[in-house]
Image (cartoon, rainbow, N blue to C red):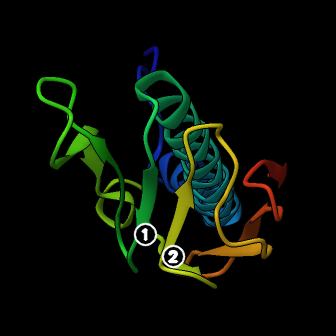
Amino acid sequence: MSRRGFSLIELITVFVLIGVIAAIGLPRLRDGLEKQNVRSAKALIATMAATARGAAIQRGCAATLNMTVDSAWVTACGVNPPAANVQVGTKKLIGDDFGVTLNPSAATIVYDPRGIATVFQTTTVQVIGPHNQDSVVVNQVGKVIKQ
């Protein structure tokens, strides 16, 4: 009589091997995803700094990059009429989107109409994940020098 299927021992062996592979692979996958989230948050901060500089130059007025522990946004003068400050683009909820917290050395970076920071100091924005951290550095004139 021919036997079809797998024995219980064979099935248990396969499940144990799958469990061992998963136990080794899942933590590495989780760590890789967290590192990617930190890198993505850094890239978003650098992009928002460039957006603030561009808005200041384009609109011919001061623009500000505002940062809190979990979000960042850009404000500049309105276009019609150019009186009150308005939000440029959308407020980015970096903490919710990437699972990180921000620790900026200054809460704001203000750019004049030439696209140069008004306070000549280096600003460091630390991006802190659960197990990884990195930083973005904005130099004295407002340009991102380390990302």
Single out the residue that lies furthest toward the top. 2
Within 10 Å of disc 1 (Cα), the crowding (few <14, some 14-19, many 20+) is many
Q: Nearer the viewer, residue 52 or 137?
A: 52
140 left or right of 19 in image? right
Residue at image mark 1: 67
Q: Nearer the viewer, residue 17 or 86?
A: 86
Badge 1 vs badge 2, beta-carbon distance below 8 Å: yes
**Distance Cα–Cα, label 1 vs label 2:** 8 Å
Coordinates of residue 23 in the picture (x, y in percent):
62, 66
**As displayed, is residue 65 above or below residue 115?**
below
Label at residue 102? 2
Coordinates of residue 1 in the picture (x, y in percent):
43, 16
Q: Nearer the viewer, residue 81 or 17?
A: 81
Q: Which mark sits nearer the N-terminus, 1 or 2?
A: 1
Q: Quadrant of residue 28?
A: bottom right
Q: Amino acid at mark 1?
A: Met
Label at residue 129? none
Q: Is residue 68 among what the camera can see?
A: yes
Q: Amino acid at mark 2?
A: Leu
- For the point 50% across and 42% down, the residue is 52
